[in-house]
Amino acid sequence: MVSSETVLDIDYRSSVMDTQPYFTVTTNKGVHHALTVVLAVGAGNAPSLPAELSLSEPTQGACHAFHISTFPSHQVQAKIAAKKPTNIVVIGGGLTSAQLSDLAIKHGVSKVWHLMRGPLKSQ
């Protein structure tokens, strides 16, 4: 599902009835539940992110390139070490996103999806 909505809140939790964590996304048009959420926040001088992602440290399951201190995250590194499948999504059309995709593959991530709205920008 692709939707143009204003995100008001994002919550990541485990369901009482299900063991798989999920996102609850509250927008100006309603509430959505999903196992995976991709936010296309657009380019600019500074990221425009929901409060949960505006922290100086990455949250579990998501972060902005400005906030990366360890890549891949400690959770992903633990899965790689345990020989479990690992999947990440890198969103962006610039060189940073391409470098992060390449770095994830070199570090052993099983699957990397690199999402871009248009062609890769090199400058």
Image (tube, rainbow, N blue to C red):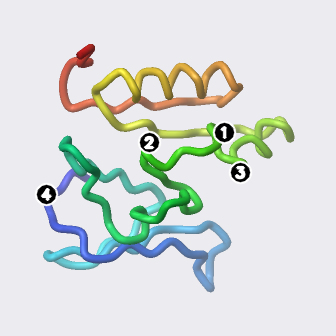
**Considering only order in the chain, which callout, 1 or 4, is on the residue closer to the N terminus?**
4
The residue under label 4 is 4
The residue under label 3 is 75
Q: Residues within 10 Å of mark 1 (few under 14, many from 20)?
A: some
The residue shown at (49%, 49%) is 67
The residue shown at (86%, 41%) is 82
- Secondary structure at badge 1 equals loop
The residue shown at (40%, 27%) is 96
**Left or right: 26 in relation to 90:** left
Q: Amino acid at mark 2?
A: Ala
The residue under label 2 is 65
Q: Amino acid at mark 4?
A: Ser
Q: Residue 93, how many percent across, how many down?
A: 28, 27
Q: Residue 78, how many percent across, how many down?
A: 79, 45
The residue shown at (60%, 76%) is 14
- Secondary structure at badge 4 equals loop
